[in-house]
Amino acid sequence: MARSAHAGMFQMFLFLLLLWFLPLTEGSLRAEPMFTAVTNSVLPPDYDSNPTQLNYGVAVTDVDHDGDFEIVVAGYNGPNLVLKYDRAQKRLVNIAVDERSSPYYALRDRQGNAIGVTACDIDGDGREEIYFLNTNNAFSGVATYTDKLFKFRNNRWEDILSDEVNVARGVASLFAGRSVACVDRRGSGRYSIYIANYAYGNVGPDALIEMDPEASDLSRGILALRDVAAEAGVSKYTGGRGVSVGPILSSSASDIFCDNENGPNFLFHNRGDGTFVDAAATAGVDDPHQHGRGVALADFNRDGKVDIVYGNWNGPHRLYLQMSARGKVHFRDIASPKFSMPSPVRTVIAADFDNDQELEIFFNNFAHRSSSANRLFRIIHREHGDPLIEELNPGDALEPEGRGTGGVVTDFDGDGMLDLILSHGESMAQPLSVFRGNQGFSNSWLRVVPRTQFGAFARGAKVVLYTKKSGAHLRIIDGGSGYLCEMEPVAHFGLGKDEASSVEVTWPDGKMASRNVASTEMNSVLEIPYPRDEDRLRDQAPLECGQGFSQQENGHCMDTNECIQFPFVCPRDKPVCVNTYGSYRCRTNKRCSRGYEPNEDGTACVGTLGQSPATRPAAAAAAATATATAGAATAAPVLVDGDLDLGVKEGCK
């Protein structure tokens, strides 16, 4: 009888233990909702600020140059919007009003069918220009209306692509495209605009627009523009979709990742001189048989390397961790079955919505032919292992009937919590939606804003925050991501109950700046200016690098190699010490045959990183070459609600 009672108690204990761990397993869904809709109070649908229309891309920049962010929305069958937070009314208000005397009037561009939008400083005046990609009357190939590039001059916003010098140069894009992004390809602080066009055969290659300094007259605000895509090595023909920019493979220089449709993805590695080479196939992210959409960059496992997450239209979504061994870089997909589940995805956003130190990934879906709810996942860091992927409840942001076309995150009200703004449209006019988080109000946070040498937002810069307990956290200042979108130019760090010790910024030209973070600076915004030569001559205070890191001779925090510092740190049963970013691990002394190496815990031999079947690189390279030369399509694609009908389009599977 006693044995039976003990057995019953043991079974009950196991059952309770299982329930305890269920929330951390893939396939579970947290019941507490993450978001609450605040559209009716913050941005109620109306004719002026939130019209019911077809909207697409969204970007965040300082349009009126007052130090606060505005939200720029690409209107497709209506005007573009510029939403400013009115602190007195506690509402977002459109400042691009329908009045010709307004300095923002031209930004409305009612004639354009805008789809993509991005902002960055292309001329080095310290103020960001705004680029709208228009796709009037075309899905691919040639459109009937040019893109617009707006600059603030003569006390108002004006389109510089329509200037006489640029009309003569024929630089204004007339091709149907999708996403646009900003890249400081030479590290000069002056940005180029990458345009992911949707080619039709050999019509409409990707473009890279930038200022021609020798032909420009900056004193008069005249910017002569040129397309340098060919000389930079990025003039490719493909079904361009998503674009994201940052030091992915490079330590500081801006690389470009493009997820494409009807062809392999591109991963343009910056050679350091402003030219690029496509490394997607060798890095394992070419994904040639899928159809990419939204994309974001982040360090999901906190190893100091930039990882890639993107969604494929009705195909498996990817969560690629960057791995490296023996000088070779390769990406490994760790997406769980729930995470990778196909959906009609558009925007993909990576952010810490509840300030708990763990990144969330938001999939904004498009109700294509039936309901398709948005989805939210938390990526939970684990020491010496892949992150856990936990599905969360998006709450009001579920939007099962939403025609999601774009979205951004920004803290427009300054409370330290990221707000989510979603756009809709394409097959049904819907107003914008605004959401606020329900969780993490007591968690600490820090927001870092690096500036270029001209004082503009340093898009593409890398920001590393060292903490007292949880190691290093990495962010990229966004120059374009999501899908058709661009997030706020801020490195937002949720800290939970941890505390920041120091912060380090690396600019695209390789310049670095480090400084301690005082306890009184928690829950605030830090502006980091571009380092001047005279700054290096000053005596720098010793940095507090936090656990697993130490200050080196160059004055910056670096990973501590515990295996060298403590040669006998590992036990006898696992004598091999392997240094990791901010820590170390011990494994058995397992020997493997040529072409194989021990796995992380030394219990088995696995293929050497970067080695794959011999046919794969050749096949991928051949596919990439064929796409670049033959074009993205040889016949006009079938347009269904603005996207390819992958179920009926000839040749697509």
Image (spheres, grey):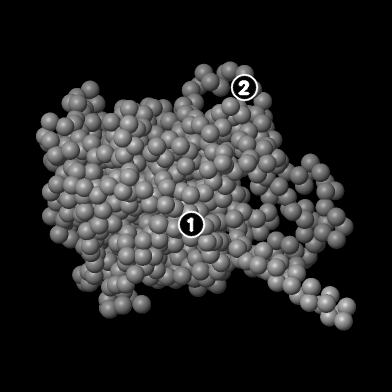
Amino acid under disc 1: Pro
Residue 501 location (% of width, % of height): 63, 33
Task: Report if residue 594 is visible in the image.
Answer: no
Residue at 66 percent across and 35 percent down: it is: 545
- Confirm or deny contact between disc 2 and disc 1 (CB under 8 A): no
Q: How many marks?
A: 2
Question: Mark 2 or 1 closer to N-term?
Answer: 1
Residue with the mark numbered 1: 33
* Element at label 1: strand
Residue with the mark numbered 2: 540
Q: CA distance from mark 2 to mark 1?
A: 45 Å
* Quarter of the figure with residue 596: bottom right
Is 553 on the left-hand or right-hand side of 453? right
Q: Which quarter of the rendering shows the N terminus?
A: bottom right
* Element at label 2: loop
* Quarter of the figure with residue 258: bottom left
Residue at 56 percent across and 28 percent down: it is: 521
Is 485 on the left-hand or right-hand side of 395? left
Residue 512 location (% of width, % of height): 53, 32
Q: Which quarter of the rendering shows the C terminus?
A: bottom left
